[in-house]
């Protein structure tokens, strides 16, 4: 049986409309029109109102590694409560294991270079980010708008790119069956060439958050 911080292909399939991508190296799924355009617009407005420069765990000396802006979304906002309810229905994950919902904004030229969402157990920030809640298990990412040019998410190991579509959700298991971080989840939030990209990200942990 899956732990409370885990989802599964079977659980996701029960939601309906979820597609598993045909890659043996990682569990990667998409679901188009997960959020409707009005809900996406409400979330974009929240990101715009509270955005700040994005930060990076285990800083590698590259000041241009992650150049987007980030917003921690207030769990009391109606649009966020609705989002959380939909994610719980989709994933089957106990909400106590979820980090606070984040929104990201990418302007022209901004990107997040190839990275993993799981934390390096030998990294300088492991204790800071993982001593209480453990490793990240699953990532759920939702595009809130379409971009005129650029802004794809590219999974480099499996050579698959996803273009932003309003309301489209991507999700993946950050770990291998033995619990270690899956290096095949390496992905790049590629530079926006024209327009602005907005996304929502929700991460889950091995243990209750906080």
Image: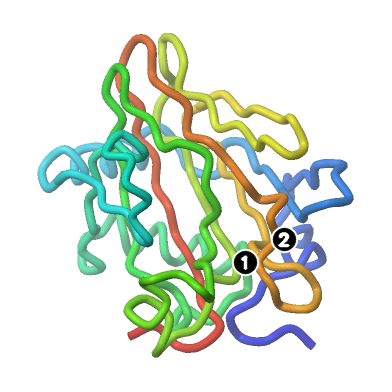
Residue at 44 percent across and 85 percent down: it is 133
Circle 1/circle 2 CB separation < 8 Å? yes
Q: Is residue 92 above or below residue 132?
A: above
Residue 106 in the figure: left or right of residue 186: left
Residue 58, by quadrant, is bottom left
Element assignment for label 1: helix
Number of the label disc, if any, that sits on residue 2: none
Q: Which residue is mark 1?
A: 91
How many neighbours does mark 2 have within 10 angstroms: few (below 14), some (14-19), or many (20 or more)?
many
Number of the label disc, if any, that sits on residue 12: 2
Q: Is residue 67 above or below residue 83?
A: above
Residue at 80 percent across and 47 percent down: it is 20
Element assignment for label 2: helix
Residue 1 in the figure: left or right of residue 200: right
Residue 66 horizontal/vertical position (percent): 34, 40
Mark earlier in primary sequence (1, 2) = 2
Residue 26 horizontal/vertical position (percent): 78, 53
Residue at 35 percent across and 9 percent down: it is 194
Residue 33, by quadrant, is top right
Q: Is residue 200 above or below residue 117?
A: above
């Amino acid at each position: 049986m899956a732990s409370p911080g885990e989802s599964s292909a079977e659980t996701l399939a029960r939601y309906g409309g979820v597609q598993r991508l045909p890659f043996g190296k990682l569990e990667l799924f998409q679901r188009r029109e997960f959020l409707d355009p009005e809900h996406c617009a409400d979330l974009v407005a929240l990101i715009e109102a509270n955005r700040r420069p994005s930060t990076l765990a285990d800083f590698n000396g590259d000041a241009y590694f992650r150049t987007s802006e980030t917003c921690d979304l207030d769990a009391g906002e109606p649009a966020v409560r609705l989002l959380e309810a939909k994610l719980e229905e989709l994933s089957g994950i106990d909400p106590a294991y979820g980090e606070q919902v984040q929104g990201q904004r990418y302007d022209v030229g901004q990107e997040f270079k190839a990275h993993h969402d799981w934390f390096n157990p030998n990294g300088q920030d492991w204790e800071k980010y993982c001593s209480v809640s453990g490793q990240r298990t699953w990532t759920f990412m939702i595009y809130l708008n379409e971009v005129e040019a650029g802004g794809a998410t590219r999974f480099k190991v499996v050579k698959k790119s996803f273009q932003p579509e309003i309301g489209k959700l991507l999700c993946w298991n950050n770990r291998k069956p033995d619990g270690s971080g899956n290096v095949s989840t390496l992905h790049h939030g590629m530079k926006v060439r024209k327009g602005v990209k907005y996304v929502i990200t929700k991460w889950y942990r091995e243990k209750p958050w906080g």
